[in-house]
Amino acid sequence: MLVLGIESTCDETACAIVRSGRDILSNVVASQHDVHASYGGVFPELACRRHIDVIIPVIERALDEAKVSKKEIDLIAVAKGPGLIGALLIGLNTAKGLALGLKKPFVGVNHVEAHLYASMMHQESPILPAIGVVISGGHTFLWHIHQLGSYTLIGSTADDAIGESFDKVASMLGLPYPGGPAIEELAKLGNPSRFPLKAGRVKGKPLDFSFSGLKTSVLYALKGANAKRQAPDAITQEEKADLAAAFQEAALGDIVDKALLATAATKSRAIYFGGGVSNNRRLREIFVERKEEIQETPVFWPPCNLSLDNAAMIAGLGYHYFIHQGGDSLDLIPSTRISLS
Ligand code: KG4
Ligand code: ZN
């Protein structure tokens, strides 16, 4: 079954052609980083305008690269949320138009669940029950995965998403957007123990996250306790690298701590990662360094072309939705916030 997937939840316009949930024939992503760079984060109105401009050429390129015609497509899958409302509407309406014009079924897919599916996509049978960790620009979630389609939310963030905090700290340090890769690069030059930083705790909820205090600690380290110095020029390049390393170590260490705690608490057999922050090499290294705590529990990562927003994960998961529940009606509306359970 050939599925055409569309993803437009935030600042990537993407289309992919995937056969039967697994074989990726094409995976085209048009990033908008150039549009948002000077704002230090995503500017929603500009994101929508760019989606409108590029969505049709992106779909045409995905079909070309897969060497399939529109008529050969069996199903249209589209990210229905969570995401920016205007951006979601563009993807959803394009998908509906295609489905109507081609007389093919269509299905709306949960973007967060698709991030988790990305690290299972190439496995014949995922190791379950497992812990799913979604860490991206908009989300920080721990899920107990019972089986594909059946989840319990066991941890989330009380304030900023982890990727958002990477982006904000990067902006404080004068680094470009998106901040995650820039912080990772700078942190390689730094000494993480110079600044004693810690991620927050949420009272009574040991699996929840809090990154806003960590972000404020970076601000104080940068500007002095009364926030009077002019950031980011007030500190040396070496101090900046140390601060980036300390922030990264605190944020990623917290993710690892809670993923391990959740695995033990639920007696899970594996950990699956998804979302842009799982691209971070230091995160993967921390797991290797802490292999005694992990014992035999396998940790699965999305391949690098599937960790950031992409449509292959949408098309792949859309296939399973369709097989199990059939398609959606053309009345389907997008949701800026949707849960898995
Ligand atoms: O999954 P994604 O493409 O979009 C959302 O669904 O939000 O994730 C984008 C986020 C950004 O915040 C970006 O800074 C972060 O992922 N990111 C990283 C790295 N690469 C991307 N964070 C840390 N280290 C990285 N190497
Ligand atoms: Zn995403």
Image: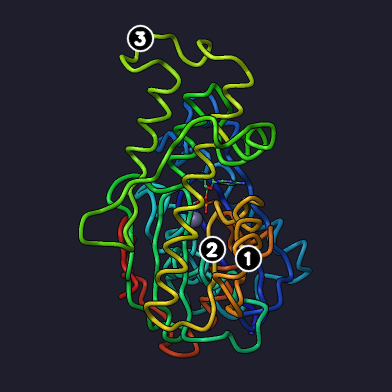
Which color scheme did the rendering employ for the protein? Answer: rainbow
N-terminal-most mark, 1 or 3: 3
Image location (x, y in percent) of residue 177: 55, 32
Front: mark 1 or 3? 3
Residue 266, image x and y in percent? 38, 81
| Residue receiving disc 2 | 274
Q: Mark 1 to mark 2: distance in Å?
A: 6 Å
Please state if 242 lies on the left or on the right of 112 as rendered.
right
| Numbered disc 3: secondary structure | loop
Q: Is residue 279 above or below residue 229?
A: below
- Identify the residue position indicated by label 1 in the image: 302
Which circle, 3 or 2, is nearer the viewer?
3
Q: Position of residue 236 (x, y in %)?
A: 59, 14
The circle on residue 149 is none
The mark nearer the N terminus, 1 or 2, is 2
Q: Residue furthest left?
A: 204
Residue 214 sits in which quadrant?
A: top left
Residues marked 1 and 2 touching at CB (< 8 Å):
yes
Position in image of residue 282 (x %, y %): 63, 50
The residue drawn where x is 59% and y is 76% is 295
Compared to residue 238, the image places residue 101 above or below, namely below
Q: Secondary structure at mark 2?
A: strand
Rate crowding at label 1 as few (under 14), some (14 to 19) or many (20 or more) other CA atoms within 10 Å.
many
In this orientation, which residue lies closer to the viewer: 55 or 241?
A: 241
* Residue that carries the numbered disc 3 in the rendered image: 228
Residue type indicated by callout 2: Gly
Mark 1 residue's CB less than 8 Å from ligand 1: no
Label 1 sits on a secondary structure element that is loop
Q: Dividing the image into 4 quarters, which one contains the C terminus?
A: bottom left
